[in-house]
Amino acid sequence: MKAISLRNKPGTRHLRGIDLRRVRPIFKSVDTPFMVLRTGRIRHNINRLRDSLPDIEIYYAVKANDHDSILRTLIDEKCNFDISSVRELDKIVENGGQVNSAIHTNPIKMIPEFDAAVNTGVRTFAADNILELEKFSKYGDRAGVLIRFKTDTGASAVNLSYKFGAELSDIPDILDRIKDLGLTFRGFCFHVGSQCTETDLYIKSIKTAGKLIGMARAKGFDSEILDIGGGFPIEYTANIPSIEDMGRAIIAALKEYIDPYIKVICEPGRFICGDSVTLFTSVIGKTVRDGKKWYYIDDGLYGSFSGRLYDHCSYQIVTNRNTKWEKAVLAGPTCDSFDVVYENCLLPPLELGDILMFPAMGAYCSVSATDFNGLKHARIVTVDW
């Protein structure tokens, strides 16, 4: 990992949409660490996704970032929501959203959570095994079933089929049990994994979905919905395929394998919120250990950089210095030696108080930050640009 210096290109004021002239006044009123959340970027991303995936309804995955400003922006944009808990559902309601079009995609649900979601108005739920179907029985037609099936996750950063998704060989028995219990069948869903850079994974999964829809039809079930999940990638430190190119391939596969009367939906999180947030931190300490420079900053793995662990993500480092570059260690502020953000990164010599900027930290960062050591979370400053 090598940091980017803003001094490499004199006069550069923008990096992935960040206008530093607008950010500087924030430093006068907010101490680091803080994040700048741009709602204009949220609007840009959802509209770009809509253009790339025409006729596919978008359900924002609230788990990626549930900040009120993001939810309110998406409600203004008439976006639907994908939830995994009642607390996420409550946040939608608190921000003025409607719940009757939301879907609940956690395949394993606690009964109190299930009860609350149904009673609040959610009508579509994912499941991936026969035992989970038993929980649906008491709700009658108020809880429809989406069968989630296992997919190949290939080059995806996070394998979401490791924990969830029915084996294809189990689908016939699941369908039979749905019939035995008299449940309402909605259709199928899959997820190719988070930060998926391999378009073929979507194509293969859509083809499989087409076969499963045919199998269900043979058993007397009409599929209403196909949920193709999320996973659409954003740029961190490596090149990725464009959403436009991925969208064209996905749309072509849907036309080839899926009946046109079936409603197709997707549940992106990262693509909508990921690059809308930039983190600013300060150097709070420095030393030399075993001949290597160590820099300590005021945010770390227990805070905004939790995505380094849970999301397997590498975030770009941006500095305003550009002298001799050396291998260094970048560590967080807690008293735990585990709290090291980067073991070997190339940095110029830094001084106490220097600011480091980390773009694209809007997904799976602040939502998984903890209160360990009693240290404050990065404050989030919302701007409409």
Image (cartoon, rainbow, N blue to C red):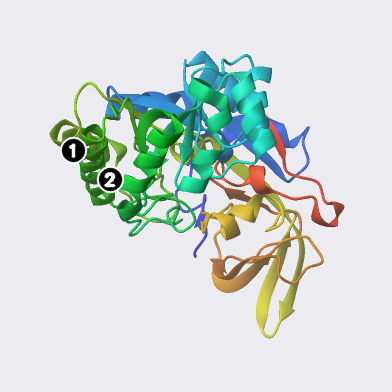
- Taking depth in this image into account, of 42 and 228 the one nearest to the observer is 228
Does residue 148 appear to the left or right of 363 in the view shown? left
Residue 64, given in percent of the width and then of the height, sits at: 55, 40
Q: Give SS at disc 2.
A: helix
* Residue 68 visible in the snapshot: no
Residue at image x 34%, y 25%? 50
- Going by the numbered disc 2, the residue's amino acid type is Tyr
Residue 66, given in percent of the width and then of the height, sits at: 62, 33
Vertical arrangement, residue 1 with respect to residue 303, above or below: below
What's the mark number on residue 202? 2
User: Dot 2, crowdedness within 10 Å: few (<14), some or many (≥20)?
Assistant: many
Q: Earlier in the sequence, mark 1 or mark 2?
A: 2
Outermost residue to the left: 256
- Going by the numbered disc 1, the residue's amino acid type is Ala
Q: Are marks 1 and 2 in contact (CB under 8 Å)?
A: yes
- Taking depth in this image into account, of 372 and 211 the one nearest to the observer is 211
Does residue 378 appear to the left or right of 12 in the view shown? right
User: Dot 1, crowdedness within 10 Å: few (<14), some or many (≥20)?
Assistant: some
Residue 310, given in percent of the width and then of the height, sits at: 58, 56
Q: Give SS at disc 1.
A: helix
Residue at image x 61%, y 27%? 117
Does residue 45 appear to the left or right of 197 in the view shown? right
Outermost residue to the bottom: 290
The quarter of the picture where residue 188 lies is top left
- Taking depth in this image into account, of 354 and 342 the one nearest to the observer is 342
- Taking depth in this image into account, of 317 and 260 the one nearest to the observer is 260
Q: Which residue is mark 1?
A: 253
Q: CA distance from mark 1 to mark 2?
A: 9 Å
The quarter of the picture where residue 361 lies is top right
Does residue 22 appear to the left or right of 101 in the view shown? right
* Residue 216 visible in the snapshot: yes
Residue 104, given in percent of the width and then of the height, sits at: 52, 32
